[in-house]
Image: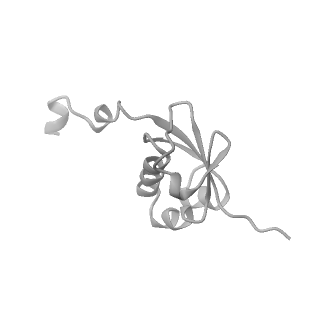
Amino acid sequence: MWTRWRGWSPQLTRQAEEVARVLLFAAAREAAGRRHAEICGDSVGEVMRAACARFGTDFERLVRSCTILVADEAVPADRWWDVAVGDADEVAVLPPVSGG
């Protein structure tokens, strides 16, 4: 409570970061327990790390096999930390699908 009394809050420290709208589909939605979330981060890597921390280990395991899209373009896992995310960006988490 002392930190609130002094005027500090975690939300205030995040103002410099961008907030992405993360869209969750199929098994990712089930693991997270929701369809979308607003998550802070300046890169895809930061957003995915924050999403994994928020949604837990089942989500984290699933994300490793997902396709991540930003502005309708796939972002390979080895480039997550290089691709910037802005306030207007949507980050889609698409689990693998099987067909027949």
Outermost residue, bottom side: 100
Classify the position of the C terminus by image quarter.
Answer: bottom right
Q: Residue 99's x, y, as percent?
A: 82, 68
Outermost residue, right side: 100
Name which residue lies at 65% across and 61% down.
95
State the residue in front, 15 or 5.
15
Classify the position of the N terminus by image quarter.
Answer: top left
State the residue in front, 45 or 60.
45
Q: Residue 89 falls in which quadrant of the image?
A: top right
Q: Is residue 24 above or below residue 7?
A: below
Name which residue lies at 42% across and 51% down.
50
Q: Residue 98's x, y, as percent?
A: 77, 68
State the residue in front, 24 or 93.
93
Q: Is residue 23 left or right of residue 18?
A: right
Name which residue lies at 45% across and 61% down.
56
Q: Residue 23's x, y, as percent?
A: 61, 46
Q: How many marks?
A: 0
Q: Is residue 71 above or below residue 30?
A: above
Q: Is residue 42 above or below residue 95?
A: above
Q: Is residue 46 left or right of residue 29?
A: left
Q: Is residue 14 left or right of residue 18?
A: left
